[in-house]
Amino acid sequence: MWTLAWRNIWRNKRRTTITAASVMFAVFFCILMRGFQIGAWNDLIDSVLRSYTGYVQIHAQGFWENRTLDYLIPENDPKIKAIADLKAPIKQLIPRFESFALASNTQKIKGVIVTGITPEVEKNFTRLHEKIVSGSYLEKNEKAVLVSQRLAKFLNLAPGDSLVLMSQGYQGASAAGLFKIKGIVKLPSPEFDNQMIFMPLETAQEFYSAPGLITSWIVDLKSADDMKKVTHTLSGYLPEQQYEVMSWHEMLVELYQQYISDEGGSVIMMIILYLIVGFGIFGTAMMMLTERRYELGVMMAVGMQRLRVSMLLSLELMFICLLGLIAGLLISIPVISYYHYHPITFSGQMAEAYKAFGMEPVLSIAWRTDYIFNQLINVTIIATIALIYPIYSVFRLNLTQALKR
């Protein structure tokens, strides 16, 4: 049966080639479209999250909703320190002190986000030192700040200038201070680049009169794929009345909704491609059935069971689909490999558009086996569905009519 089916598909080479080519191009375009989409979103999400929020954060219960200094947590809580002993894919915990303030250069004033950081730790997470466009990086405990580029431009600031910050400290204390600008940093997200000021953690705690307290812990993951697992593990480990563990899906709701919306659009596009493949296979099966009615009638007249005839047709179409799947995979892998290691770099207006959305002006393709094999599985399922009616037609074939030429 296998040999006969293989020989039969080459009796009409043109039909076999066209059908296999339609499957091949559908697989190729589905893999490429999905790969570029995943790559673009991975770059955007990783750029935004590693610039500031991280994938998972730990706060005091109610902090994220209210965002005030009434919800601080101790920096040396043994329960938090013990997280490192959990068998979870966590790289490190990063302390942060975040609050709001008014920044002034004596001529202009603007509301900003002040973030207290541990300079050495941030080098391995946000790589803030690599984003400095002028000036130098922070040192531990110094009374100096880094200012985001767009904010510095608005306030007309440069390294070496002084910046006045005014806010309300912990438990109603007054917070005001004069800080030297150590450097200017360029953040990928326009929203953050318009309002961010970084200072050493101890300096922030002193400024807000909150020694030994922080607003959040960022959980640095070994892999972004572990986010749900880590969030679930920490939520079960930490006291619910005292702490809240949040993933970026909950913290950056708008970005997550955009991601889900784009995922829905890609699903629609792939469904269209799958329908094209399905109708192509369906048409081929019906043509094979119509052209070979006499042949099939003779086979059944001499004693071949209808089940075996339907199996023969199924094997023929399976071979055609398999050829298309293999060919699609073979031409996809080199393209994926090339654009993964050599991303497309945009310039001009396209580059500005990417920067406006907080993205680097490059487009890379994700190198992951899951979405590649998902496309192969999806096309196989579509092909199987397309075969149902043609195979069913074999059992309804009228021998008397089929044997008439």
Image: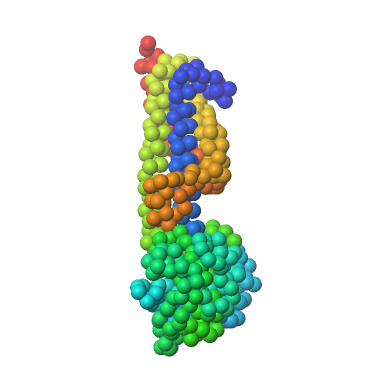
Give the percent coordinates (x, y) of residue 402.
39, 17
Residue sitting nearer the eye, 159 or 119? 159
Image mark count? 0
In the rendered image, which quarter is residue 103 located in?
bottom left
Residue drawn at the location 51% of the way across and 68% of the way down? 183
- Identity of the residue drawn at 50% across and 31% down: 324
Instruction: Give the side of residue 26 with respect to residue 143, left or right.
Output: left
Q: Depth check: 90 or 309 in front?
A: 90
Say above or below: 48 vs 367. Answer: below
Instruction: Say above or below: 199 vs 173.
Output: above
Q: Is residue 32 above or below residue 109?
A: above
In the rendered view, does 66 fall on the left or right side of 340?
left
Residue furthest top as drawn: 405
Q: Does the image show residue 382?
A: yes
- Specify whether 83 is left or right of 194: right
Give above or below for 262 relative to 117.
above
Residue sitting nearer the eye, 7 or 47: 47
Question: The N terminus is located in which quarter?
Answer: top right
Residue 339: x and y in percent read 53, 42
- Residue 227: percent from left, percent from top: 52, 62
Q: Quick one: quadrant of the C terminus?
A: top left
Q: Residue at x 59, y 61 (%)?
A: 222
Identity of the residue drawn at 45% across and 47% down:
37
Residue 265 is situated, as x and y percent measured from the top left of the image, at 37, 48
> Is residue 305 something that shows in the picture?
no
Residue at the right extreme of this rendering: 85
* Front-lying residue, 335 or 230: 335
